Image: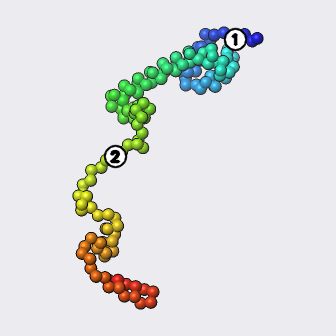
Amino acid sequence: MIPALPYSKLVEKHILECIQGGIGIRQMIASMQHLQDAPKSLSTMYKIYGSFIEMERAKINGAVGKKVIDQALEGDFKSQELFLRSKGGWSPTQTNIEVEQETDPDLDESAVDTLMSLLGYNTNGPEEETTCSCEEDNCRCS
């Protein structure tokens, strides 16, 4: 039976430096192989140092989160948007923009009505008798 790796303060220090530097876990494992009692796999790393890793990440996330919240509360738009996207469930694609209509809906014409009126066809006026004349394949109505 292979003996379990002991907890190493040197490995812990290396992990701390990597986490504070934003190094990914796989790079972290590769970069510590020169240290005695360094874990060689992800599962061993988390088995021995998992709680330490999570505690350090929580400290950093808390410090950054506090800074973002403080800036958001002070009026920084980017911090407000970041907070609302990540914690508030907000998305700019889900935002409804309401625009006040300045025209009377009863007087508003549809695009089709406007086009027909410009072409000389009045669809809303009194009905006029239409006269059509056809010559061969060409018909004209007035």
The amino acid at mark 1 is Ala
Report how far apart the C-alphas of labels 2 and 1 lie in the structure.
Answer: 61 Å
Q: In the image, residue 63 lies at what x, y percent?
A: 44, 21
Q: Quadrant of residue 17?
A: top right
Q: Which mark, residue 4?
A: 1
Q: In the image, residue 12 lies at what x, y percent?
A: 59, 13
Q: Which mark, residue 15?
A: none
- Residue 78 visible in the displayed image: no
- The answer to whether residue 29 is above or below residue 78 is above
Task: Tell me what residue is drawn at x 61 percent, y 10 percent.
Answer: 9
**Quadrant location of the C terminus in the rendered image:** bottom left
The amino acid at mark 2 is Ile
User: Dot 1: what SS?
Assistant: loop
Query: Which residue position holds label 2?
Result: 97
- The answer to whether residue 82 is above or below residue 129 is above
Q: Quadrant of residue 136?
A: bottom left
Task: Tell me what residue is drawn at x 37 percent, y 88 percent.
Answer: 133
Task: Tell me what residue is drawn at x 56 percent, y 15 percent.
Answer: 52
**Color theme of the render:** rainbow
- The answer to whether residue 141 is above or below residue 28 is below
Q: Quadrant of residue 68?
A: top left
**Quadrant location of the N terminus in the rendered image:** top right
Local packing at callout 2 (Cα closer than 10 Å; few below 14, some 14-19, many 20+) is few
Q: In the image, residue 15 lies at what x, y percent?
A: 59, 17
Q: In the image, residue 3 lies at what x, y percent?
A: 72, 10
| Front residue of this view, candidates 1 and 36 | 1
